[in-house]
Image: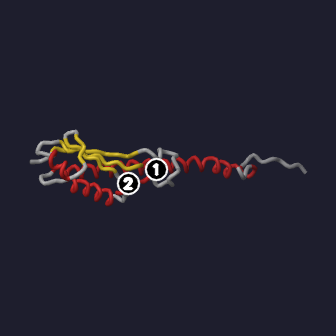
Amino acid sequence: MRFRRSTGRAARPGVAALEFAIVCPILFLIFLGMVEIGRAVMVSGSVTSAARGAARAGAVTGGSYSALTAAATASLTSAGLPSGAATVTVTVNGVTVSDDASFQAAALPGATVAVTVSVPYGRVSWLPGGVTLFLSGNRTISGGCALTKEA
């Protein structure tokens, strides 16, 4: 009795499992990268929106530094981002201000109120803190807006 070797699927039962074992980690890494880069883009939009809201709070008549920082914090909190990790930088006509008195002195009608909000990427990443596969953990995501102070 002679045995013939089959050339069909039955002769190679483990090939599909081997191919899956090789391709699956690559596909998972691509998927994880898409999720993490998407998260960074979403955070960038939220940070820019916070800067826009803060600049608006400072540019309106009666706007103050306290109202400006409160608007940025509220916007970040509503987006689910850690507002304590954010850095809010306010400049009026190119001069950095850090309290209500200096803001009121510099923010005269027609002055440019610029706000920059920055958040360290490591604080908003969904990956554990030490994992830097896609973006560096010490990278900063920031957004800004400049408006003219109203009369």
Please name the residue that numbered disc 1 is placed on: 36
Q: Residues within 10 Å of mark 1 (few under 14, many from 20)?
A: some
Query: Quick one: 105 or 109, which is closer to the camera?
Result: 105
* Number of marks present in the image shown: 2
Counting from the top left corner in percent of width and height, residue 17 is at: 67, 52
Counting from the top left corner in percent of width and height, residue 93 is at: 19, 40
> Looking at the image, which residue is at 12% across and 45% down?
108
Q: Left of 11 or right of it: where is 120?
A: left
Query: Quick one: 67 or 45, which is closer to the camera?
Result: 67
> Looking at the image, which residue is at 12% across and 52% down?
61
* Type of the residue with mark 1: Glu
Q: Left of 74 or right of it: where is 150?
A: left
> Looking at the image, which residue is at 55% across and 48% down?
27
Numbered label attached to residue 85 = 2
Q: Left of 29 or right of it: where is 80?
A: left
Counting from the top left corner in percent of width and height, residue 36 is at: 46, 50
Farthest residue in the front direction? Answer: 101
Task: Assign a secondary structure to mark 1.
Answer: helix
Q: Left of 15 or right of it: where is 108?
A: left
Task: Assign a secondary structure to mark 2.
Answer: helix
Q: Residues within 10 Å of mark 2 (few under 14, many from 20)?
A: some
Q: How far apart are the alpha carbons under marks 2 and 1?
A: 19 Å
Numbered label attached to residue 114 = none
**What kind of colouring is applied to the model shown?**
secondary structure
* Type of the residue with mark 2: Ala
> Which dot, 2 or 1, sits closer to the camera?
2
Query: Quick one: 123 or 6, which is closer to the camera?
Result: 123
Counting from the top left corner in percent of width and height, residue 60 is at: 14, 51
The mark that comes first in sequence, 2 or 1, is: 1
> Looking at the image, which residue is at 45% across and 53% down?
125
Farthest residue in the right direction? Answer: 1
